[in-house]
Amino acid sequence: MRKLLSGNEATATAMKQINPDVVAAYPITPSTEVVHYFAQYVADGDVDTQFVAVESEHSAMSACIGASAAGGRTGTVTSACGLALMWELLYVASGQRLPMTLAVINRALSGPININNDHSDSMGARDSGWIQLYSENNQEAYDNYIMSWKISEHKDVLLPTMVCQDGFITSHAVENIELLEDAKVKSFVGEFTPNRHLLDGKALSVGPYDTPQFYFEHQYQRAQAMIKAKDVVAQVSAEFGKLTGRNYSFFEEYQMKDAEKVIVVLNSSAGTARVACDQLRAKGEKVGVLKIRLFRPFPMEEIAQALSHVKAVAVMDKCDSFNGMGGPVFVDVRTACYELANRPMIINYIYGLGGRDVTVENFLHVYENLDKVVKSGKTDNVYRHVGVRGVN
Amino acid sequence: MSNMVEIRWHGRGGQGAKTASLLLADAAFAQGKYVQGFPEYGPERMGAPIAAYNRISDERSSLHSNIYEPDFVVVVDATLLSAVAVTGGLKETGGIVINSEKAPAELVDQLEGYKGKVYTIDASSIAGEELGNRSLSNTAMLAAIVKVTGVIPEAAFMKEMEASIKDTFSSKPHVIAPNMKAIERGLKEVKGL
């Protein structure tokens, strides 16, 4: 079905088609619209979801944890400080191995307060035991959201999943989208049948004190589940590809075959980077783009393989780690490449913080500097910024 | 992408520039186009200058930046001419459409040497006369930009707008005809063609 929808409406539509048992949410810009649309579906009887209008994001995540522990299919939506307020419970959800999905409409964390896009919210939660999928546009946000339920609920995974898209840039932009029929979504996602839950009539405790005799083993199991999630993401994505013709990998390779200079990027700016790449390809430059979709679990071996023939890489981070050495995507990509026999030179660019518009020129600037790195054979300062006044 | 038309809207918060850009996106989408419609977001304040954008093309555009070199600019509020660089980056092969009762030649001085085409439409008066409210000028502005750009055939645009307005105002059927009249006049009363 060909439609014209914003990223938020696309997410809300997928949510309606999935018809979860419980949605608990508290509105925050720019994700508010998703809750707004969904509350309307509930009021109109389009879904039979139990909608819980909670008093905070801490409560939203708590309610989802309760619902999931009781065997319900559940999810929520948030942005920025809302995600920060969920922090304590993010670990509880993944630690108790409770499947659920969280649509993150990426927005900068305070302070100073800012309502616009960057990835400081979800990047901060990258090690909370949640699977993370990133989406370039409304179509990917919709597709990833549908897939996320199946990934999260898979018996080898049982980990909560975040589906991220850029606040305002895609959440509030209307673009063409292909929707699936309701019945197709329902049959793709299937019924949620948890192995054990609080309401199945057998004695079960969820979330009791975990003594030193067991806690470590449980953490090990959580870590193993995250490793296994990679195969499940591949499997669910392949099934989705069969259904829709839209094929998703852990990352998308654009002009990578013979690329010598590559930009690694995720979410909405990837498309802008491809336009810069096309302009330079037209001049005969061997440039490429690698767009990460699956950030947690991190597809370490596959990314290393994809970059093994490349001379220089710029990893883009829409989030600063304030650690004196570079952003989160950079650190992981660089680590992934450590085992390569001929590893590329790798630099980092912090970009687009707090809604700073990200342009084709920004990416041309990055490619130009990659060219300097290749020609000089030196990375020099690896921790760089693009688009910030007074710096470049 | 050679066939892509990029449009930048300038208005003030509350004047409906964002809504007009979304309606244009709807109408172009209904003609089989790939479209983007998006506003520049910040703290939303009534009366503050805002911008909104459209990309209309035959293939999907993967760009997700603002538009710096538009083919066309729409100015919903002529007081912005002295407040915002509305012709910034505007291609001289394109044009600018301004909501004003003046003739295009009278406004050229305020356009910082812009050499492309200048159009005016008295959308506020049309809104005042047809809708009883001069601030509801965005529908006539929308019609004017459709006329000037030719991105959508006029008949198809009218049909699409009628369906869209009927849908939006299903609980207020008495406002459908006046809105359609404002659109019709918007198509007819552009000066500078």
Image (spheres, rainbow, N blue to C red):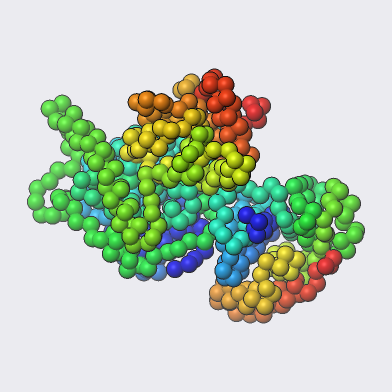
Question: Which of A372/B97 is in front?
Answer: A372
Q: Residue at x 38, y 51 (%)?
A: A248
Estimate the x, y position of residue B70 in percent, counting from the top left: 71, 53
The image quarter in which residue B157 lies = bottom right
* Relative height, residue A367 to residue B47 (above, below): above
Which residue ends up furthest to the left in the rendered image?
A: A202
Identify which residue is drawn at 75% across, 72% down. B187
Going by the image, does A148 lie left or right of B8?
Answer: left
Name which quarter of the figure residue B139 lies in: bottom right
What percent of the width, then of the height, locates residue A193? Answer: 19, 56
Q: Establish if A260 lies above or below A162.
A: above
Indicate the quadrant containing the C terminus of chain A: top left, top right, bottom left or bottom right: top right
In the image, A361: left or right of A169? right
Q: Can residue A277 be spotted in the picture? A: yes
Residue A114 in view of the camera: no
- In the image, residue A271 sits, relative to residue A4, either above or below, namely above
> Percent x, y for residue B193?
83, 67
- How many marks overall? 0
Q: Quadrant of residue A301?
A: top left
- Where the N terminus of chain A falls, by quadrant? bottom left
In-front residue for pair B50/A277: A277
Percent from the top left, x then y, of residue A80? 46, 41
**Residue B68 higher or lower than B126, as above or below:** above
Give the residue drawn at x 66%, y 56%. B2
